[in-house]
Amino acid sequence: MAYNAQVGIPLVFFHPVLDLAFQPVSGQAGSVTQALIGPDLLPASEVATLTDAAAGWVRVAITLTGQGVYQLTLTNPNPPTADGGIFIYPIQVSQGILAATNLLTSLDRVRERMQLTDTDRTTIAPGDTHPWDSVINSLISEVSDEYQQDLGRTFAQQVYTEYLDGSGRPSLILGAGPIVSVTSVESIAYEDDGAGGVTETATTVERHTYVIAGLITQPRYIGLGRIDRLGASVFTRGPRKFKVVYTAGFAAVPEKVVGIATSDVVYRMMTRESSHMIAQSLGDGNISYLGPQRMMDARQAALDPYRLERVA
């Protein structure tokens, strides 16, 4: 099976070094020889970095610069030092994808949930590498973008500048939430600049004339923000009549969302070769799989409270 890698991203895996009695041999990173063939079937210029890991293992790190299938050959020292084994590692290199800007879980959380271990069967510590890291990171990016697009929101706290239609009512519904702070609210008048364009004239809506609803300080509030005029005032009706600059979102993604995203990434990792199965025999028992539709329904039910929908 080929390793999957991305152009310009280090690939790390572990290579075994044993003697003729199948016993682990330590300290052989400097004695293992390497040869790399590129996608054009000619010798490639990239060189793998080999370092000693646990007994019987050499850590291999290589960064490849082109797309296609590479072939890395590692040869162990000859007997009696080691077994002289020749190992050929195919590496499929792709351009990769741009990670989501706002991720809803992390590599470490997913690896912990999957209980991934290192070559010596100890739990992987943050900062260590694993051959599945590239696939896991891609799934994290896909899940994060998919969830936030479906829910109509970005969870991360950020600054928004919005031009909103005047409603003719005492309230303006903002496009994000919950609100952290409002920098400014302005009434906008548009005039022909005489050169085929439009000139904006902004008039500040004084702070004492409105209140802010949907603040993040409101216990358990996760919906849209709102500006409410005081007294008998209304937001004058008209297209793009008001400009609001504000900060909204969460300082940290809610743990409920992180948990759902983490579980989904693990589910997609574990079923990427068996998503068609309903059950599988294992030893004396069966493992039942949650079908894709049931998984989607359960996920939607859990995430629905975070969905942002404007009220007309």
Image (cartoon, grey):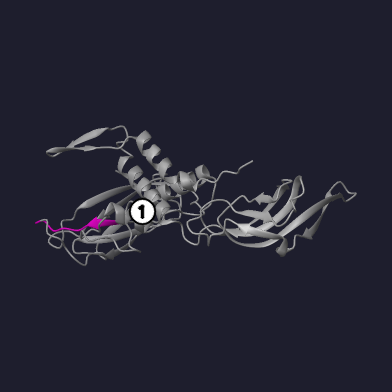
Residue 174 on image: x %, y %: 63, 51
Depicted 28 relative to depicted 137: above or below:
below
Q: Residues within 10 Å of mark 1 (few under 14, many from 20)?
A: some
Point 27% across, 37% down: residue: 289
Q: Quadrant of residue 130?
A: bottom left
Relative to the observer, which residue lies in front, 4 or 164?
164
Residue 111 on image: x %, y %: 32, 55
Start and end of the magenta stretch?
Answer: 13-21
Name the side, left or right, on which 221 lies relative to 231.
left
Residue 32 on image: x %, y %: 25, 60
Identity of the residue furthest to the bottom in this view: 27
Q: Which residue is tagged 1? A: 133
Point 84% across, 48% down: residue: 197
Q: Is residue 19 magenta?
A: yes
Point 88% across, 51% down: residue: 193
Relative to the observer, which residue lies in front, 7 or 184?
184
Residue 81 on image: x %, y %: 15, 63
